[in-house]
Image: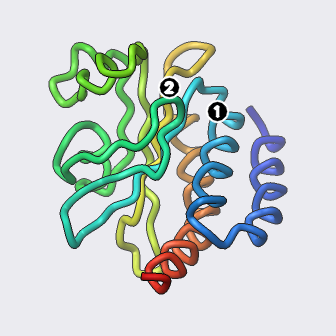
């Protein structure tokens, strides 16, 4: 993966301006993240500090997921504010295997990347599952970290607009 990936992210960045709601922003970010890293699934978890929960509007393939902020690999990513790579999830005690059991999906590997707002607080987590060609590595982590930075402003704006609707 070379400069083409970063050019693709820049091109996607130009499209981000048209997204102004959570319902259009999250699926678009997830689809682009999957395409860039060549992963089977991607979910964008939103951090809700008022309830100490992480939730998805729509999780790729299985509908909405809501978990405690201190749960699972996604929770670790959000609370530690660090990316997490797990290439053997069923051997990791933090892995929430019940979600796979419920959906029938088999997770082979996981990459989670925090998304920061303009105040440097974690507002979301990108979770990619099942890289098609091998395990997730530091290169994937770097690319997705760059991607998360790139999409963070759009996500922050969409979250603010969603909150103002309430």
Q: Are marks 1 and 2 in contact (CB under 8 Å)?
A: yes
In the rendered view, tell whether residue 166 sits above or below residue 74: below
Relative image position of residue 90 (x, y in whole percent): 26, 14
Residue located at (60% from left, 54% from top): 146
Q: Horizontally, is 3 left or right of 124 in the view?
A: right
Number of residues whose C-alpha sits closer than 10 Å to that of mark 1, classed few (under 14), some (14–19) or many (20 or more): many
Cα–Cα span, label 1 and label 2: 9 Å
Q: Horizontally, is 94 left or right of 138 in the view?
A: left
In the rendered view, tell whether residue 11 sits above or below residue 131: below
* Residue situated in front as seen by the camera: 159 or 132: 159
Relative image position of residue 46 (x, y in whole percent): 40, 58
Q: Mark 2 points at which residue?
A: 136
Q: Horizontally, is 127 left or right of 36 in the view?
A: left
Q: Which residue lies furthest to the front in this view?
A: 166
Relative image position of residue 144 (x, y in whole percent): 57, 45
Residue 38: image quadrant is top right
Total of numbered circles in the picture? 2
Q: Mark 1 points at which residue?
A: 37
Marked residue nearer the N-terminal end (1 or 2): 1
Relative image position of residue 163 (x, y in whole percent): 44, 80
Q: In which quarter of the image is the C terminus?
A: bottom left
In the rendered view, tell whether residue 33 sits above or below residue 164: above
Residue located at (21% from left, 53% from top): 69
Residue 92: image quadrant is top left
Residue 54: image quadrant is bottom left
In the rendered view, tell whether residue 36 sits above or below residue 144: above
């Amino acid at each position: 993966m070379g400069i083409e990936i970063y050019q693709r992210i820049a091109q996607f960045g130009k499209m981000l301006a048209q997204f102004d709601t959570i319902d259009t922003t999250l699926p678009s970010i997830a689809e682009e993240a999957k395409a860039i890293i060549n992963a089977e699934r991607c979910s964008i978890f939103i951090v809700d500090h008022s309830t100490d929960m992480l939730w998805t509007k729509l999780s790729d393939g299985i509908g909405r997921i809501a978990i405690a902020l201190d749960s699972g690999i996604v929770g670790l990513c959000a609370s530690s504010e660090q990316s997490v790579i797990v290439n053997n999830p069923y051997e990791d005690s933090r892995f929430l295997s019940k979600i796979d059991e419920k959906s029938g999906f088999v997770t082979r590997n996981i990459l989670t990347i925090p998304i920061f707002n303009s105040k440097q607080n974690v507002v979301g987590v990108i979770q990619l599952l099942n890289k098609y060609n091998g395990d997730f590595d530091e290169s994937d982590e770097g690319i997705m970290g760059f991607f998360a930075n790139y999409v963070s402003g759009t996500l922050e704006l969409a979250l603010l607009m969603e909150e103002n609707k309430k």
